[in-house]
Amino acid sequence: MAGEPQADCLFCKIVAGIIPATVVQETETTFAFRDINPQAPMHVLVIPRVHYPDAGSLAAAEPTIAADVLSVAAQIAADEKVDDYGYRIVFNTGTGAGQTVFHAHAHVLGGRGLEWPPG
């Protein structure tokens, strides 16, 4: 069922503490940790504690939690001191966009120039 933890989901396992992660911040609704394959000097993933396959389904079902993900992403950028120079928040949706874990998540990237378009 949507929103419920999924036994085969990598990010659900990280939230549950089954798989270790370098935790950056936790809130009641979100969990943030460092990406194991960083694409920038600062690369943190912010995920909702509830399971939805992508950002669109999360926003449709739980708009307050989707807003929490964005708020936490901005707070992490400030805490990591990349907010003055600039940072990027990316939601990949679908395999064609590079999504490999089908649990909604935001990539927060910063610490270097981020060219546009990214890919």
Image (tube, rainbow, N blue to C red):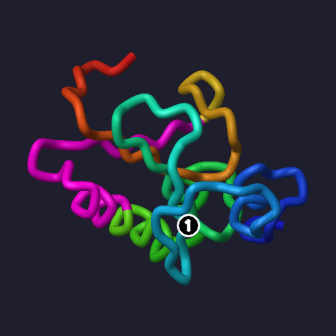
Who's the residue at 33% across and 21% down the image? 118
Figure check: 23 above or below 115: below
Nearer-the-camera pick, 30 or 94: 30
- Magenta residues (range): 73-93
| Nearer to me, 100 or 80 | 80
Q: Quadrant of the C terminus?
A: top left
Crowding near the residue tagged with mark 1, few <14, some 14–19, many ≥20 C-alpha atoms within 10 Å: many
Query: Taking 115 as reference, is 16 above or below it?
Result: below
Q: Position of residue 32 (x, y in %)?
A: 51, 61
As shown in the figure, which amino acid type bears the numbered disc 1? Phe
The image shows residue 93 at horizontal and vertical percentages of 56, 38
Residue 100 x %, y %: 67, 33
According to the image, label 1 marks what residue? 31
76 with respect to 111 (left or right): right
**Residue placed furthest toward the left:** 84
At a point 80% along the width and 67% down the height, the residue shown is 5
- Counting from the top left corner in percent of width and height, residue 15 is at 69, 66
- Residue at image position (72%, 59%) is 14
| Residue 82 falls inside the magenta stretch | yes
Residue lying at 67% horizontally and 51% vertically, measured from the top left:
103
Q: Is residue 75 above or below residue 81?
A: below
Let me know if residue 71 is in the magenta part: no
Quarter of the image that includes the N terminus: bottom right
Q: Quadrant of residue 98?
A: top right
The foreground one among 4 and 45 is 45
SS at mark 1?
Answer: strand
**Between residues 39 and 96, which one lies in front from this camera angle?**
39
Q: Is residue 54 left or right of residue 109?
A: right
